[in-house]
Amino acid sequence: MPRSNRPRGARPGSDDGDDLARLLTGWRRTEVRRGATWSVQPVGVAHALKEYRCPGCVHPIEPGTPHVVAWRADGPMGDERNLADRRHWHTHCWRLS
């Protein structure tokens, strides 16, 4: 009998909780830049629906352009203020900052 290459789903007893949590957070990561801790979350093509202005180069980030969103993870004003102050960056501009 030939082998079937169809995916069979999760194996019984396997824990996919880590993969699900990673998908739900959008692959958010923490980076240290300029002496501060930043939360950085990539934005894919499907979720890049609006135009933003990159603070690194001051050029627009057009809708449909993958980019990153960054905000202070350790800001003195608290989590709500940090999230409100988030900025959208071109991926290459963030890497150079």
Image: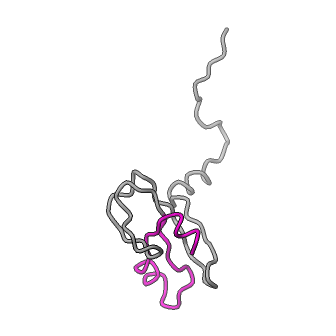
Residue 18 position by quadrant: bottom right
Instruction: Give whichever of 57, 27 is nearer the camera.
Output: 57
Residue 6 position by quadrant: top right
Q: Is residue 12 above or below residue 21?
A: above
Residue 85 position by quadrant: bottom left
Instruction: Give whichever of 19, 60 is nearer the camera.
Output: 60
**Count of numbered circles in the view:** 0
In which quadrant is the C terminus drawn?
bottom right
Which residue appears at 35% of the width and 60% of the height? 62
Residue 48, image x, y percentages: 38, 58
Which residue appears at 55% of the width and 79% of the height? 73
Which residue appears at 59% of the width and 29% of the height? 8
Residue 77, image x, y percentages: 48, 90
Q: Which range of residues does the magenta coloring cover?
A: 68-97
Task: Check if residue 80 falls in the magenta segment.
Answer: yes
Residue 69, image x, y percentages: 47, 68
Residue 22, image x, y percentages: 57, 56
Q: Is residue 4 above or below residue 80?
A: above
Which residue appears at 53% of the width and 86% of the height? 75
Task: Check if residue 37 falls in the magenta segment.
Answer: no
